[in-house]
Amino acid sequence: MADYYSSASFVVAMTAEQAAVAATILHLVQDEDHPDLLARRPSRALRQEYAPEVLSRARRIRRLLINNGDMELDYLALEFDFEPMTSEGATGLWVSDCGEHINGNKAATCIQELLRHFGLDHPVGFEVAYHCSKARLDAFGGCAFFITRKSIRWNSTMCWLEQQFQRLKARTSTTD
């Protein structure tokens, strides 16, 4: 049996303080100990534990992920790892696959919300590699995401290849 994987690793540039707040927000988004996060009025304990802006952004991100169909109330995992990074010449939030997988859509949505939260104007881009433990025809590929506060754009290698074949086919059919 073949095992399928997706991998990525990148840093969202921000200050060390912003990265710490971002990590707190993302931990809260996927925290199953707080099912009342989306309640009309979150519990007193939740309101006392988190700053209002952290609570507000975490609520917004969880709602977006649920509404986009990327998250369910009974499975709150973000499907990517994150932690503040202040080494290797980079300061920001390090985002990576969680061992064997990364959900690029969830990562992109969360990153866009963090860019908005901190008022960051720089774009963030990352690539995801798809691979497999055994050679399979459908086992390899990838995609890339380009994120700003206003938009998320992405393209997969499979879509790009298909576009190239279609362009060639269109060119050759007009010359026949």
Image (tube, rainbow, N blue to C red):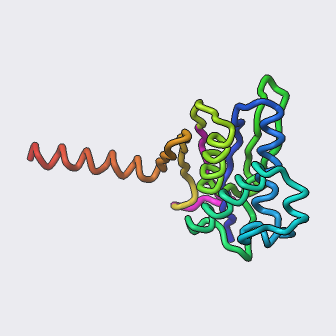
Please tell me whether residue 136 belongs to the stretch shown in magenta: yes
Question: For residue 68, what is the image quadrant?
Answer: bottom right
Q: Provide the major secondary structure of the magenta segment.
A: strand
Left or right of 86, for residue 170 = left
Q: Which residue is drawn at 65% across and 67% down?
A: 71
| Residue under the image location 36 percent in, 52 percent down | 162
Q: Which of 25 and 129 is in front in this view?
A: 25
The front one of 37 and 146 is: 37
The structure residue drawn at horizontal position 18% and vertical position 43%, both measured from the top left corner, is: 171
The percent coordinates of residue 113 (x first, y second) are: 63, 47
Residue lying farthest to the bottom in this orientation:
74
Magenta segment boundaries in residue numbering:
125-137
Residue situated furthest top in the rendering:
89
Residue 83, image x, y percentages: 82, 44
Please provide percent x and percent y for residue 104. 61, 53
- Within the magenta stretch, is there residue 31? no
Task: Locate residue 45, reporting x and y percent.
Answer: 91, 64
Farthest residue to the left: give it. 176
- Residue 162 placement, left or right of 29: left
Q: How many labels does the image show?
A: 0
Q: Please name the residue shown 68% across and 62% down the image.
A: 62
Quarter of the figure that contains the N terminus: bottom right
**In the picture shown, does residue 133 fall above or below 34?**
above
